[in-house]
Image (tube, coloured by chain):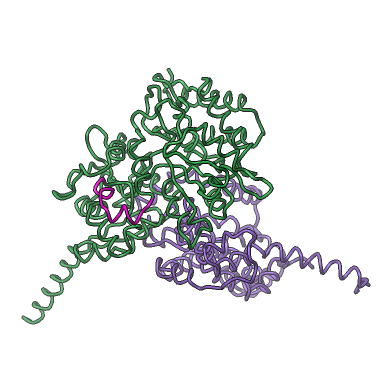
Chain colours: A purple, B green
C-alpha cells in the first residue's frame, strides 16, 4: 500500500539525495574537467569550473607517450578472465555450501573471508618467488590466476547468499525428474540465480579492473594493465595533474560505461532476495 | 623433395636469425621529464643497434622503487636495466645485486662525470651505476618581492639572512609567505630537506659508533630554527607540503623563497606553467658558517642487476644514454635547455648550454658543494647527504619525519619531537645490530 508523503518531505528527500549523489560523483567530474585544462589552469587558485580554454592536448600527449590500447586489452583480459574463472570455481562451491551444508560450512566461509584480512604486502615476496619459479611473472595468465584467488572469497560469499534465497525444493524436484548434478546446477540453479550471478560478475570485474597492488607488482612490460598506465603519470616531482587526469579518465571510462549500462542488473542483483 | 628441404632449411634459418636478433632489453625507469624524453628517443638507439630492441616500464618514483626492489631482492630477472637513486646504489652494490660497469666503451670518458656524483656511485673503486641526471638543492626566490622589501640576495646566503628576509617579505593578508619549505613526513620528503639543513647546522644522524645524535644541541638548534621560521613566515598547513605542494604555491606567486631540488628551476621559469616565470632568481642553499651548505645531492642512475643474461647489450645502452653524444642528440632535437643536467663536466663548459640554461652555474656549484662521503661537519660512519645509505633508513627516516612533521604542526614541542626521534632511532639501530 502506497504511503502518503507530503510534497515538502519529497522535496527535502530529493534535495538531500541529489546533494549526496553529486558529492560522490564530484571527484570523477573534477578529474574529467581537469583533463581538458592546461597544466597551469589545473593548479590555478581559485580554480575555474567550466569557463576555461578547453583543450584536448593532454589526451594527445598521453596517447603519444603510452600504448593505451595494449594496457586496455591487458585490463580486459585480466578482469574478465579472472572473474569468469572465479565464477566457474565459485558456483559449485556456493551450491555445496548453500544446499548441502555440513557442520563446518560456516567455519569454512569465515576462513575464506579471513584470507582477505591479511595485508597483501605480507605475502608479496613468497608470491613473487612462486611466480618467478613458475615463469608467470609479467604474464596475463599469472595475473588472471592471482586475481581469481584474491576475489574468490568475495565471489563465493556473494553467490552463497544469493543461492540461500532459492528454495531447495525446486532443486529437489529437478533431482526427482532425474537431473544429474551438473544439469541441476546448469539448467535449474543458474537461470534462477542469474540476477545474483550477474551482479557478482559486474562487481568483480570492477574490483579486478581497479586492483592495483598485485597487477603493478607482478607485471612489467608485457602484461601491465591500466593501473600501470596510470602509475606512469602520477609524479611526486612535477605538477602534471592535467595529464594525470586525462590518463585517469581514459582508464576509468570503459568500466564507467560498462557500469552505466548494467546498473539496472547490478542494483537488481544487490537487492535480490530482499522480498520473500 | 629438394625444394621441400630447401624451404625447410630457409624457414629454420630465418627462425634462427630471428631468435638471434630478438634481444630485447626491458628498462624500468622513473616518469620524470628527462626519462620520458629518453624513451621518445628510443629509435635513435635502435637504428644504430638493430640487434637490440627496447621495452620500457615507466612508473612513478615510489611505485618503481617498490617494484624494482622486490625484483632484485628475489632475483626475479624482470628487468635488464633499472633506474635507481643515489640511495640504493651503495646498498645494492654491497649486497652484490649490481654488475660493475666496466665495459662502457673507449669513448665513454668516465673522468668527465662530475666528481661529487661519481663518488656516490663508486664502491671499492668500481662504478656500479651510470648517472642519467643529477640534482642538488638551491634557493629559488622572487626578485620582485626582494626589490620591494629593499633586500639583495647574495649568491651564497646564510640561514640568518634567509630567515630575516623571509620574515620581512611575509604579507599574510595578501597570502604571500616569505618561505616555503617541505613539511610532509617521509624520508624523501621533509627528511631530505631537514637532514641536509641539519648538516649546515653542524648536526648529524649518527656518531662514529652509530649512536643517534638527536639529543645533541645541534639538532635542537636546527629544528627549533626551522619550526620558528615556518610558524612566522611559512604558509598555513605547511606540515602537509611536499615538493608538489610547494611548487604549486611558488608557481601561483604565494612564496617569496623556496629551497628545494634544482630540477624545480625549469618548472618555475616555464611561462606555460608558472605565473612568476620572469621574476625568479637563484642562490646557493644557505649555510651557518660552519663549512657545510644545506644542499643535497641526488642522481637517477642506470644500473644492471647481477645475473642479467643481457649484460653486454645493457652496457651498450647505458653507455649511449649517459654518454656525451646523447646530450648532443637531445640538444639537436629539443634544445639545450632540455638536456639532462648534473652529470658531466663538459656540459657545463659548453657555452651554448650556459646560454640556454640560466640556472646552469648555480646547479653545478650546488652539486660541487655537496660531499656524500663527508656530509656533516663532524665525522659520520655513513654515506649520503640528505639520507643515510643503510637499508633501515627508509623506515627510520619516515618515522623520524613523522615526529618532526608533528612538531611543525604544533602537535608536540621541538624537545618532545627530538626525544621521540632519539628514542625510536636508538631502538631501531639496536634492533638492526648497529649498536652493540
- Residue A112 or residue B264, whichever sits in front: B264
In the rendered image, residue B128, in percent from the top left (x then y), is placed at: 26, 41
Q: Residue furthest top?
A: B436
> Could you tell me if residue A117 is visible in this image?
yes
Please, is residue A76 above or below residue B232 in the view?
Answer: below
Residue A261: image quadrant is bottom right
- In-image side of B275 versus B345 (left or right): right
Q: Locate the C terminus of chain A by quadrant.
A: bottom right
> Could you tell me if residue B310 is visible in this image?
no
Q: Residue furthest front?
A: B150
- In-image side of A55 versus A272 (left or right): left
Magenta span contains residue B171: no
Q: Residue at x 62, y 44 (%)?
A: B235
Please, is residue B169 above or below residue B266 in the view?
Answer: above
What is the tally of numbered marks visible in this picture? 0
Q: Main secondary structure of the magenta part?
A: helix
In the rendered image, residue A24, in percent from the top left (x then y), is placed at: 69, 62
- In-image side of B179 versus B77 (left or right): right
Q: Locate the N terminus of chain A by quadrant.
A: bottom right
In the rendered image, residue B130, in percent from the top left (x then y), is placed at: 27, 46
In the rendered image, residue B224, in percent from the top left (x then y), is placed at: 58, 28
Q: Which residues are magenta?
A: B345-358
- Residue B430 or residue B288, whichever sits in front: B288
- Residue A251 or residue A235, whichever sits in front: A235
Amino acid at each position: 500500500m502506497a504511503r502518503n508523503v507530503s510534497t515538502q518531505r519529497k522535496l527535502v528527500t530529493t534535495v538531500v539525495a541529489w546533494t549526496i549523489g553529486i558529492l560522490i560523483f564530484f571527484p570523477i567530474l573534477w578529474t574529467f574537467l581537469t583533463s581538458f585544462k592546461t597544466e597551469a589552469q589545473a593548479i590555478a587558485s581559485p580554480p575555474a569550473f567550466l569557463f576555461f580554454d578547453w583543450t584536448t592536448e593532454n589526451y594527445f600527449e598521453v596517447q603519444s607517450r603510452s600504448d593505451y590500447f595494449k594496457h586496455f586489452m591487458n585490463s580486459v583480459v585480466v578482469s574478465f578472465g579472472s572473474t569468469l574463472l572465479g565464477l566457474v570455481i565459485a558456483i559449485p562451491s556456493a551450491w555445496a555450501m548453500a544446499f548441502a551444508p555440513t557442520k563446518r560450512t560456516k567455519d569454512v566461509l569465515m576462513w575464506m573471508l579471513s584470507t582477505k584480512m591479511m595485508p597483501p604486502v605480507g605475502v608479496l615476496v613468497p608470491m613473487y618467488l612462486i611466480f618467478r619459479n613458475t615463469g608467470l611473472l609479467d604474464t596475463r595468465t599469472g595475473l588472471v590466476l592471482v586475481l581469481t584467488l584474491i576475489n574468490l572469497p568475495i565471489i563465493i560469499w556473494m553467490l552463497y547468499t544469493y543461492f540461500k534465497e532459492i528454495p531447495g525444493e525446486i532443486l529437489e524436484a529437478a533431482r526427482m525428474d532425474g537431473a544429474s548434478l551438473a544439469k541441476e546446477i546448469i539448467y535449474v540453479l543458474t537461470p534462477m540465480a542469474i540476477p545474483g550471478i550477474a551482479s557478482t560478475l559486474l562487481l568483480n570485474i570492477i574490483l579486478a579492473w581497479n586492483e592495483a597492488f598485485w597487477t603493478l607488482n607482478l607485471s612489467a612490460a608485457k602484461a601491465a594493465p591500466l593501473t600501470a598506465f596510470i602509475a606512469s603519470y602520477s609524479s611526486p616531482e612535477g605538477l602534471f595533474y592535467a595529464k594525470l587526469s586525462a590518463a585517469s579518465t581514459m582508464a576509468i571510462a570503459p568500466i564507467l560505461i560498462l557500469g552505466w549500462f548494467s546498473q539496472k542488473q547490478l542494483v537488481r542483483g544487490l537487492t535480490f532476495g530482499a522480498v520473500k | 623433395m629438394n625444394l621441400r628441404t630447401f624451404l625447410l632449411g630457409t624457414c629454420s634459418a630465418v627462425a634462427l636469425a630471428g631468435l638471434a636478433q630478438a634481444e630485447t632489453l626491458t628498462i624500468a625507469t622513473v616518469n620524470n621529464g628527462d626519462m620520458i624524453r629518453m624513451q621518445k628517443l628510443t629509435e635513435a638507439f635502435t637504428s644504430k643497434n638493430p640487434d637490440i630492441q627496447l621495452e620500457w616500464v615507466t612508473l612513478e618514483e615510489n611505485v618503481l622503487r617498490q617494484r624494482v626492489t622486490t625484483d632484485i631482492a628475489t632475483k626475479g630477472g624482470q628487468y635488464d636495466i633499472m633506474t635507481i637513486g643515489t640511495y640504493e646504489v651503495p646498498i645494492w652494490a654491497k649486497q652484490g645485486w649490481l654488475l660493475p660497469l666496466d665495459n662502457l666503451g673507449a669513448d665513454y670518458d668516465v673522468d668527465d662525470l662530475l666528481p661529487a656524483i661519481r663518488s656516490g656511485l663508486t664502491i671499492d673503486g668500481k662504478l656500479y651505476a651510470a648517472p642519467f641526471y643529477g640534482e642538488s638543492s638551491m634557493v629559488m626566490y622572487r626578485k620582485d618581492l626582494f626589490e620591494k622589501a629593499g633586500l639583495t640576495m647574495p649568491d651564497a646566503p646564510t640561514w640568518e639572512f634567509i630567515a630575516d628576509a623571509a620574515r620581512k617579505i611575509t604579507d599574510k593578508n595578501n597570502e604571500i609567505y616569505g618561505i616555503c619549505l617541505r613539511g610532509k613526513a617521509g624520508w624523501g620528503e621533509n627528511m631530505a630537506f631537514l637532514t641536509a639543513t641539519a648538516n649546515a647546522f653542524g648536526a648529524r644522524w649518527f656518531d662514529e659508533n652509530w649512536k643517534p645524535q638527536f639529543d645533541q644541541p645541534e639538532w635542537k638548534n636546527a629544528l627549533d630554527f626551522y619550526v620558528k621560521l615556518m610558524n612566522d613566515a611559512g604558509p598555513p598547513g605547511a606540515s602537509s607540503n611536499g615538493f608538489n605542494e610547494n611548487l604549486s604555491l611558488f608557481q601561483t606567486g604565494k612564496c617569496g623563497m623556496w629551497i628545494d631540488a634544482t630540477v624545480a628551476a625549469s618548472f618555475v621559469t616555464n611561462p606555460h606553467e608558472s605565473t612568476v616565470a620572469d621574476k625568479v632568481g637563484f642562490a646557493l642553499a644557505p649555510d651557518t658558517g660552519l663549512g657545510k651548505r644545506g644542499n643535497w645531492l641526488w642522481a637517477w642512475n642506470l644500473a644492471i642487476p647481477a645475473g642479467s643474461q643481457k649484460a653486454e647489450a645493457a652496457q651498450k645502452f647505458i653507455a649511449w644514454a649517459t654518454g656525451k653524444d646523447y646530450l648532443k642528440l637531445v640538444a639537436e632535437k629539443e634544445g639545450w635547455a632540455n638536456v639532462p643536467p648534473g652529470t658531466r663536466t663538459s656540459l657545463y663548459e659548453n657555452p651554448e648550454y650556459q646560454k640556454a640554461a640560466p640556472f646552469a652555474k648555480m646547479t653545478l656549484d650546488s652539486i660541487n658543494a655537496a660531499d656524500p662521503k663527508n656530509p656533516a661537519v663532524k665525522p659520520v660512519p655513513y654515506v649520503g647527504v640528505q639520507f643515510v645509505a643503510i637499508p633501515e633508513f627508509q623506515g627510520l627516516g619516515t618515522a623520524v619525519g613523522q615526529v618532526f612533521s608533528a612538531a611543525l604542526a604544533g602537535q608536540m614541542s621541538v624537545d618532545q619531537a627530538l626525544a621521540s626521534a632519539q628514542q625510536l632511532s636508538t631502538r631501531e639501530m639496536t634492533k638492526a645490530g648497529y649498536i652493540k
